[in-house]
Amino acid sequence: MKISPGRSKPEGGHGHHWFSALGVTDENAIKEKLGEMFTTSIREGSLEDVEGTKCYSKSLNDALLVKTITVEGEAQTMYPIVAWGSKYNATVIDVSEWQNGVEAWAKIQLAGPTLWLFATDYYRNRERYIWGSSVEVSVAALGYWAKPAMRRKIKGESGKEYLTETMCALIPLSLKRAAWPDDFWFQGEVLDTRKLNDYVMFHTRLIRQMENGADLKIWICVQRGLVAGQIDAGGYASGALWLQGSLV
């Protein structure tokens, strides 16, 4: 694994991810819930031991998994993972390791688009996240919010008008405001929906016709309380998401 020279390691964190995953806005309630989840994960989760780095994986529900990581017995992090991934061939372009040494953002190039994502398996596969390496990656997203796409008209450079309602796009939130690189605004065609417990899964086409002719289609998991309006298969949705992935 290589880190870009001269770049300090980010601290990272998952506070806003847990707000979205649990649909709880009270900070004290979040802390109490996370404390319970930490204890349960350590006691009941399946264990991976990678040279002293231990990861306990526990199903939160049909939509989400929880990973709790300790190093030499000291807790390092706990984060939610969307259980349903879509597989794509990619090239690793860059890696930004967090200060704890067990988490990282990875920049991958698909067939055309280049995207940052949170590497949910970095603690286990750090030696495979090498610049220029060809990998197969399973990609999914946790939604911060979602709503039906708005019907607007915009003019292209030629003066032709387009309906934004039927556009597909994945745009880094950092272009508009301070945000982490794996946070995106999205709009896409909803191909399928599944209701699981307190969550809605949207199978969404986010990018049409990449260079290999394929579309980028992933599952976005959104807590029901964060979905505004009715979003059905065959329609279009917009919102914000946290992109995550792991090597296959």
Image: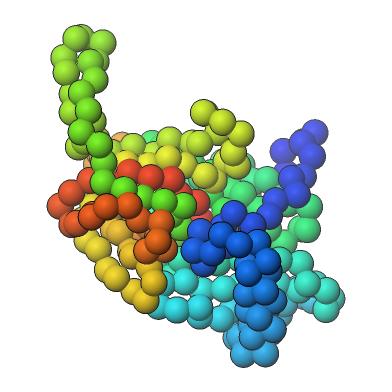
Q: Is residue 55 left or right of residue 135?
A: right
Q: In x, y percent, where is residue 119? A: 58, 57
Given the current orientation, which residue lies at the most extreme top position? 158
In which quarter of the view is residue 72 placed? bottom right
In which quarter of the view is residue 43 placed? bottom right
Is residue 142 visible to the viewer in this orientation of the structure?
Answer: yes
- Name the residue nearer the viewer: 186 or 208: 186
Q: In x, y percent, where is residue 18? A: 58, 62
- Total labels drawn: 0
Given the current orientation, which residue lies at the most extreme bottom position? 44
- Name the residue nearer the viewer: 109 or 192: 192
At a point 25% along the width and 36% down the height, the residue shown is 150
At a point 49% along the width and 63% down the height, the residue shown is 23
Q: Is residue 52 left or right of residue 25?
A: right
At a point 61% along the width and 62% down the height, the residue shown is 26
At a point 18% along the width and 49% down the height, the residue shown is 235
Q: Which color mode does the image show?
A: rainbow
Q: Is 181 drawn above or below residue 120 in the view shown?
A: above
Q: Is 7 drawn above or below residue 128 in the view shown?
A: above
- Name the residue nearer the viewer: 178 or 134: 178
Q: In x, y percent, where is residue 134? A: 50, 51
Is residue 212 visible to the viewer in this orientation of the structure?
Answer: no
Q: In x, y percent, where is residue 170? A: 39, 39
Q: Is residue 83 left or right of residue 164?
A: right
